[in-house]
Amino acid sequence: MYNCTMNMNKTQILNDKQTKQILKRLAYQVYESNFNEKELIIAAVEGRGSKIAAMLCDELASISKLKLITTDIVLDKSNPEEKKIVLSTSGLNIKGKSVLVVDDVLNTGKTMLYALIPFVKDKAARIQTLVLVDRSHKMFPVSADFIGTALSTTLQEHIEVSIERGKVNVFLK
């Protein structure tokens, strides 16, 4: 007989101060990789990815003169192949531009893979990816170019990114 009760205890992996420091470091890395660009499209997976991207944009704006264009990627995370993937900014010209796709957690790579489709389809010149947490459970051939922190977790464990009133905390459940 197996005990199937879930342990609802959370272990804090990153507090707000650590997360903000990581976002600052990521901003410098993104800028270093894109310093020759005049503008950069920051495309975030709708939800927590959008909030992480907004904080990243604030950091980038404080250290660079890059023109930052933001948009959200709207997709069904549990069934991305079933519904159309759209950008929140209609008519956004992607062709020949550099794009940074942002999400909070990279787990299997499925969401990130589908999030890249609009940019591949519209012929972006360069696509980079950024995640706050990489769990390294790849089922799809997608990896992040910029990683806040990488964690080795079991498949039963869950990473929770909590963003409340501008405070970002990361928990392992």
Image: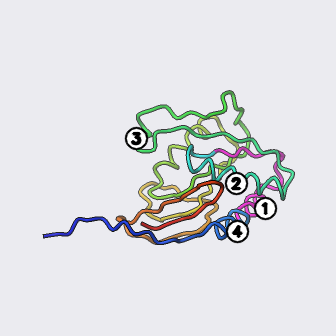
For the C terminus, give its image quadrant: bottom left
Locate residue 28, reporting x and y percent.
Answer: 77, 63
Q: Residue at x 52, y 35 (%)?
A: 85
Can you give x and y, in whole percent of width and height, for residue 148 in the image?
A: 62, 65
Q: CA distance from mark 1 to mark 4?
A: 17 Å
Q: Which mark is residue 32?
A: 1
Of residues 96 and 146, the one drawn nearer to the viewer in this rendering: 146
Measure how far apart labels 2 and 4 are at the Cα level.
11 Å
* Residue 56 percent coordinates (x, y): 71, 55
N-term mark: 2 or 1: 1
Name the residue tied to disc 2. Answer: 55
Q: Residue at 54% across / 69% down in the picture? A: 150
Front of the two marks 1 and 3: 3
Q: Quadrant of residue 94?
A: top right
**Between tags 2 and 3, which lies in front?**
2
On screen, residue 56 versus residue 156, left or right, reads right
Outermost residue, left side? 1
Q: Which residues are magenta?
A: 26-43
Crowd rating for badge 2 (residues with CA inside 10 Å; few <14, some 14–19, many 20+): some
Q: CA distance from mark 2 to mark 1?
A: 18 Å
The residue beneath circle 4 is 21
The local secondary structure at tag 3 comes to loop
Which one is earlier in the sequence, the residue at label 3 or at label 4? Answer: 4
Residue in the foreground of this view, choosing between 125 and 5: 5
**Amino acid at the residue labelled 1:** Glu
Q: Is residue 40 magenta?
A: yes
Horizontal arrangement in the rendering, residue 120 relative to residue 70 (left or right): left
Q: Which residue is mark 3?
A: 79
Q: In the rendered structure, are the residues bearing label 2 and label 4 in contact, judged by CB atoms less than 8 Å apart?
A: no
The amino acid sitting under disc 4 is: Gln
Residue type, numbered disc 3: Asn
